[in-house]
Amino acid sequence: MKLSTSAKLRQATLARDRELSLGLVATAVLALLPALAPDWQLSELARYFSYMMLAASLAWVWGHCGLLCLGQAVFFGIGAYAMSVVSLAKLPMLPQLQSMWLGLLLAVALTGAFAWFLGLLFFSSARLGGAFFGIVTLAVAFIVERLAINWSFLGGLNGLMGVPAMRFGLNGGEEQFDGVIVYYVALLLTVALIGLLLRITRSEWGRVMTAVRNQPLRAEALGIDVAREKNRAFVLGAVIASVAGAFFVTQFNFASPPLIGFALSAEALIWVAVGGRTSVVAAALGALLVRLLEGWLTDQLGDYWLLALGSLFVVVVVALPRGVLGQWIAGRTALRQE
Amino acid sequence: MTILLDAANYVLILTLVALGLAIVFGLMNVINMAHGELMMIGAYVVVSARQADLPVWIGMAAAPLVVAALGMVIEELVVRRVYTRLLDTILATWGLSMILKQAIVLGFGPGSWSVPNPLPTLVTVFGEPYPLYRLFIMLVAVLALALTFALFFATDWGLTARSVIANRPMAACLGIDTRSLDRATFAYGAGLAGLAGAVMAPIVSLDPQFGAGFLVPAFLSILVGGLGSVAAPLAGATALGVTDTLVSAFHSPVWAQGVVFSVAIILIRVFPRGIAARGQRGV
């Protein structure tokens, strides 16, 4: 269906409102949950929050900026390992430091530098766009996973166990085991980061990235440094994934190679595709919904669950490229566009 | 010398896998992430033949046909619906690979299978003993590659296919049935993967992860080789395969994959058009 410009504008405004209200409603529901749900479910949910942040970071990188990253979990994993190494007081030469804050800082610094390096390597050549970039990031995921498996400093195949829970002290301190407090900290972090991403997608820079995604040549002609902007966007996505990973490990108390490689990257891609790649809110809720569905359906379907998940993924990609929630946000009239 | 033969072995198999991918990509602009799983299913066809007390050879002959038929079904059900969306072909076929892998886990269990070697003798090559079966693999791979090149460069069908690769809308305007060509091409690419999996079955410990280990090297082969021609995957696979075998032999197999992938990424960066490129096509 062809729409007039004004109709398109109206629709875009409507979609933005829907996205925001979806986010607000979800936040409200999640904020009220501790009144109803038992403690163990809260800690389960708090863990899912880190998946939501990972999904949102991938939606930003892939859906908004058009950089299909098949290895987003690499950054999640680097964050998780960085946090574990610091919290376990395993820092080389500085074993007296074990602050959670330092772990977070290290996670952000390491992933930021790594993503920046990768971006520098690949975005400067226009020929390595789209699919090429996807395959290369997939290879990077394989390399990094291999590295984690074979590096005994990181615990090899077994990973790093016994990572302490959250400790708010400047250098260690008491572990925080109160489920409700941890839940609210997690929720706050998640809402803050996803809100930040949402704001960025709607900022001027967000529009620049849309231009880079849709019309790289035209964007270049308008004076936008496409390679540099892509790199900045990629680094931002990586840092958010890394914070998610660092937070995850304080919850899960265990960092292992599956967190850093192919498997989690693929899962994140499914969450984002099912939720909706064009919206960070939809993608994050996609992660939550798929995980909840998984918890519920693995009991019923057993080994057939993966079969069902794969089929769901294929059907969504083929028939609903905007994802389930993304389609709702975009509205019905947008169904046949693009 | 044995190292060289091992390297040649790996290179040829990798070329066979990469060639299937490259044909499908070149002709249809589809990136098939399920290619590794198609290869794995080829190997499981041999296992099924064993279970039915049929000779291994029958399984090997049937594998390419079974997998090609499966490829045709996949093309009809999924791939043709995402033709125009390159990045979505990655996702849809990735989902397919999950489905196929899980189907095999359900059918054959997650554990590993072994297929007895049908040619267990050693022969002397360049003064050193070498397994006869590995020479057979090389022979099959060379024949399959030769057949593919003959098909593309010496038949009318190949001419048609190459015209579609060069300019799809124009070819369609001239009355070429691109639809059936796509279907046949996808099936042929799948068949090549099935063949590669089937001949590899007796020399590996076969589990559902088998195909995934070949997918990324095959993709990198294509990217390293370049997308310009049907011959490019051979160049890419040679670069990757030789590096892999040398690192495995002189350092350790543990690091081989990491080194190979890193080398490949650097090569791709330095030669974005591929080391064998003269073509002008981009992605």
Image (tube, rainbow, N blue to C red):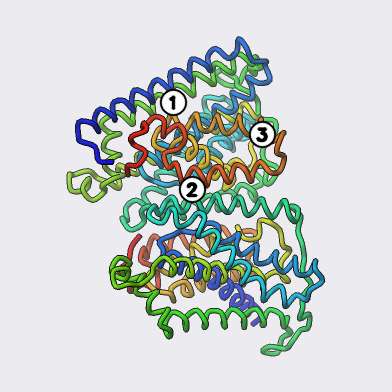
Look at the image and tell me in which quarter the N terminus of chain B lies: bottom right
Q: Say which element carries label 1.
A: helix
Which numbered mark, 1 or 3, is in the foreground of this view?
A: 3
Pinpoint the chain carrying mark 2.
A
Which numbered mark, 3 or 2, is in the foreground of this view?
A: 3
Question: In front: A255, or A329?
Answer: A329
Task: Please give the residue where the numbered disc 1 appears in the rendered image.
Answer: A193
Tell me whether the residue at label 3 lies in contact with that at label 2, contact meaning CB atoms closer than 8 angstroms.
Answer: no
The local crowd at label 3, few if under 14, some if 14 to 19, many if 20 or more residues have their Cα within 10 Å, is: some
The three-letter code of the residue at mark 1 reads: Leu
**Which label sits on residue A70?**
2
Residue A6 x %, y %: 20, 31
Q: Kindly tell me whether residue A285 is visible in this rendering.
A: yes
The three-letter code of the residue at mark 2 reads: Leu
The image quadrant that residue B164 belongs to is: bottom left
Q: Say which element carries label 2.
A: loop
To the question of a shared chain for discs 1 and 3, the answer is: yes
To the question of a shared chain for discs 2 and 1, the answer is: yes
The three-letter code of the residue at mark 3 reads: Leu
Residue at coordinates 71% horizontally, 67% vertically from top-left? B204
Q: Kindly tell me whether residue A246 is visible in this rendering.
A: no
Task: Please give the residue where the numbered disc 3 appears in the rendered image.
Answer: A297
Tell me whether the residue at label 2 lies in contact with that at label 1, contact meaning CB atoms closer than 8 angstroms.
Answer: no
Residue A270 versus residue B97 in the image, above or below? above
Residue at coordinates 45% horizontally, 69% vertically from top-left? B23
Q: Is residue B260 left or right of residue B169?
A: right
Name the residue at the right extreme: B53
Residue B198 x %, y %: 67, 70
